[in-house]
Image: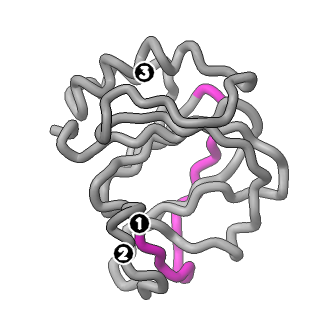
Amino acid sequence: MIFDDVKNLQNYVSLAPEAVKLLIPVLAELSADTPNGKTILIEDKLFILISRYDTNATAEGKFEIHRNFADLQMLLDGSEDICYTGDETLECVSAYDEKNDYALYARNGASTHLALKPGNFAIFLPEEKHLPGRGDGTPVVKAVIKIHKSLLN
């Protein structure tokens, strides 16, 4: 897991050189007014999903993992908490869905809470358990960038 400010994204070029080089100018152009939808940068390997939703209480959620994609999550408007855990003992409550690249895990035990605000981002590598969209019901505009594991070093 990585948590930083988007102005420092170039510091992570060694993590995913091709992806980061493409993302730096694109992410700089995103704003709270960017419409919902999917923008493909590299077919089946790098794309941006823009969505709007209201945050939910932490107790209501389940941790998710992805096997084929890393998530770079960046708020464009609002604020939310993202929970992160390295707990390998969590119970899988929804088996891995290969088509949609996710599995869900029960929320129990300790986790780290990241306060995501516009201007910063969190990266969750494949298999890292994260629980996004947490908060007090406030609306957010968010970009989730999916980076295929073949682009990661």
Count neighbours of disc 3 (C-alpha within 10 A) and say few if under 14, some if 14 to 19, many if 20 or more: few
- Residue 109 vs 19, above or below: the answer is below
Magenta part of the protein: which range? 103-119
Structural distance between the alpha carbons of marks 3 and 2: 33 Å
Q: Earlier in the sequence, mark 1 or mark 2?
A: 2
Q: Which residue is mark 2?
A: 96
Q: Is residue 106 left or right of residue 87?
A: right
> Image point 57% across, 13% down: which residue?
29
Q: Amino acid at mark 1?
A: Tyr
Q: CA distance from mark 1 to mark 2?
A: 5 Å
- Between label 1 and label 3, give the one nearer the viewer: 1
Give the Cα distance between marks 1 and 3: 28 Å
* Residue bearing the label numbered 3: 8
For the point 39% across and 75% down, the residue is 87
Image: 65 above or below 24: below
Q: Identify the image's colour scheme: rainbow, by chain, secondary structure or one colour.
A: one colour
Secondary structure beneath label 2: strand
Callout 1: few (<14), some (14-19), or many (20+) C-alpha neighbours within 10 Å? some
> Does residue 93 show up?
yes
Quarter of the figure that contains the C terminus? top left
Amino acid type of the residue that numbered disc 2 sits on in the rendered structure: Tyr
Tell me if residue 142 comes above or below residue 70 in the rendering.
Answer: above
Residue 107 counted in the magenta span = yes
Residue at point 47% right, 75% down? 104
Q: Are marks 1 and 2 in contact (CB under 8 Å)?
A: yes
Dot 3: element: helix
Asked if residue 68 lies in the magenta stretch, the reply is: no
Q: Inspect the image, locate mark 3, and give the three-letter code of the amino acid beneath it.
A: Asn
Q: Locate residue 74, reporting x and y percent.
A: 56, 36
Residue 135: x and y, percent? Answer: 75, 56
Q: Say whether residue 48 is left or right of residue 9.
A: right
> Label 1, on which residue?
102
